[in-house]
Amino acid sequence: MMKKTSILLTLCVIACSFTSPRPVRPHQKSELRTIVIDPGHGGFDPGCHGLFAKEKDVALAISLKLGKAIEQAFPDIKVIYTRTTDIMPGNARNIHDGCVYRADMANRAHGDLFLSIHCNSNGKSAGIYHAKKLIGHKMVGKGRKRRRVPIYETYSIKNRTVGTTSFVWKATWGEYKSTMINGAGGGEDMGDSTAIIDVSSPEARMRAQLYEKKYFANSALFATYVQDEFLKSGRVSEGVQQREVGIWVLEATGMPSILVETGYLTNKEEEQYLSSKGGQNEVVHNILDALRRYKSSLDGDGGTNTTRVNPRSPVRTAR
């Protein structure tokens, strides 16, 4: 779950990469062979809460249904889960180690796409939260201790925040960045670990540029398709976003990767939707349709599911 104050940005990389479809190459193997699905949180880490639902449970339910739907629609695609039960991936004892396990699993599997499933919170109490407003002042105390104090009125507010978001990793570098130092996914050996590297070195900057060119545009493309499919089904979309503070599992996975916030558990109606069989099936259907479009684009088949990204479509940066 992420809090988002958004600034509109235009990413030229999307326009450069996707203004024209790829040529058809007969007998070419699909570029999408292994998908890693990551149900967010798990075990001791519940994620955000609704009135009755926990993010870890909803994310797992949607993820398992999505994996089965992908296997049925694309028998040639291998689906790998970072967890299939209510545990922190790898039975890690803390969230950091769990994130390391998620990324290492994806990289060792030579994944072609990393998809992390989450639910959102706006930081307020689920359903209804309370606020107060100033309605006046009064004098209290006697003598020198007499003073003027504010009078507040407490009132209830329905938590109305709804919407979906697709996050992609931050495609700019700060002083340091967590990334892979032993190669990247898609068939290359990932070695044994990840590390923090000094991006001031020419080698690190070159790796960053290659990583961005190879993976970022495809991440943004798939994320755009996902949000487009949510919009088609009548959901509210908060668009494709980046965070100023990076999302580690997206940065440390050597493949196109996105994190999908499927909705707000803090909204009563959206919590009910995401917890229902029908709502979860619709979310799965939306992501699966987006995957069809993405795969069609990668394979260059020129099919009706392939669309071009509007070069002026914004990717927003959330703090």
Image (cartoon, rainbow, N blue to C red):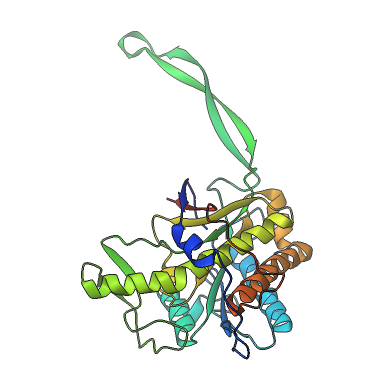
User: Which of the 4 image quadrants contains residue 205?
Assistant: bottom left
Q: Nearer the viewer, residue 84 or 316?
A: 316
Nearer-the-camera pick, 294 or 227: 294
Please give left or right for residue 56 compared with residue 94 in the image: right
Question: Where residue 31 sits in the image (x, y, percent)?
Answer: 56, 83
**Residue 54 visible somewhere in the drawing:** no
Q: Position of residue 27 (x, y in %)?
A: 62, 91
Residue lying at the far top of the rendered structure: 143
**Extreme residue toward the right, this view:** 278
Vertical placement of 317 versus 283: above or below? Answer: above
The residue shown at (57%, 75%) is 22
x, y (%) of residue 135? 54, 18
Q: Quadrant of residue 36?
A: bottom right
Tally of marks: 0
Camera-nearest residue between 5 and 23: 23
In the rendered image, the vertical position of residue 308 relative to residue 193, given as above or below: above
Q: In this orientation, which residue lies closer to the viewer: 79 or 278?
A: 79
- Relative to 137, is 183 on the left or the right? left
Q: Is residue 291 visible in this depiction of the protein?
A: yes
At horizontal 32% and vertical 75% (from top left) the residue drawn is: 207
Q: Position of residue 310 (x, y in %)?
A: 57, 56
Q: Where 7 falls versus 146 (above or below)?
A: below
